[in-house]
Amino acid sequence: MLKIIGLGIVCLFFLIGGIGHFTHTESFVAIMPPYVPFHLEAVYISGVFELLGALGILWKKTRRIAGIGLFVLVLMVTPANIHMYLNAEQFPNFSMTYHYVRFAVQLALLSIIWWSTKPDKNALNPIG
């Protein structure tokens, strides 16, 4: 039951985030570090992969690869989070507490993705 809740959290997080890449594109572009090329394209591509990953974890056959993909995706957006933190004066609408919470949520998200999408050989998986 806890894995189902974990999958639901991950799915919802990435569905909302993936849609956000298309509805609030400018916000995502604004936090991109200057050394990352093709900001707009990267935002759209990462949004597509967020949506694919969110849907992919719903099916047993694609769950593990989708989980690995989402895990890697979270790691790949870490530079944007670090850029925001190190350049907080450029983002006055976000408090330092926001940045600390964001890092904590990112670590928790990585843990939930890994745990909820790994195969459970000893139990029946009701989502499949």
Image (cartoon, helix red, strand yellow):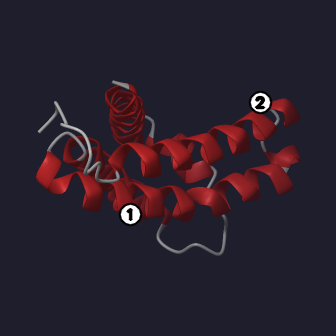
Q: Position of residue 38 (x, y in %)?
A: 47, 70
Q: Position of residue 76 (x, y in %)?
A: 53, 64
- Res. 54 image quadrant: top left
Whether residue 95 is visible here, answered yes or no, is no
Q: Quadrant of residue 44?
A: bottom left
Q: Evaluate whether residue 119 shows in this view.
A: yes
**In the image, what residue type sits under mark 2?**
Asn
Mark 1: amino acid: Glu
Task: Give me the disc on residue 93.
Answer: 2
39 with respect to 63 (left or right): right
Q: Is residue 44 left or right of residue 29?
A: left
Q: Residue tagged by mark 1?
A: 41
User: Residue 42, how many percent across, how many down?
Assistant: 43, 63
Q: Quadrant of the N terminus?
A: top left
The picture quadrant where one finds residue 71 is bottom left
Q: Residue 107 appears at what percent x and percent y?
A: 64, 47
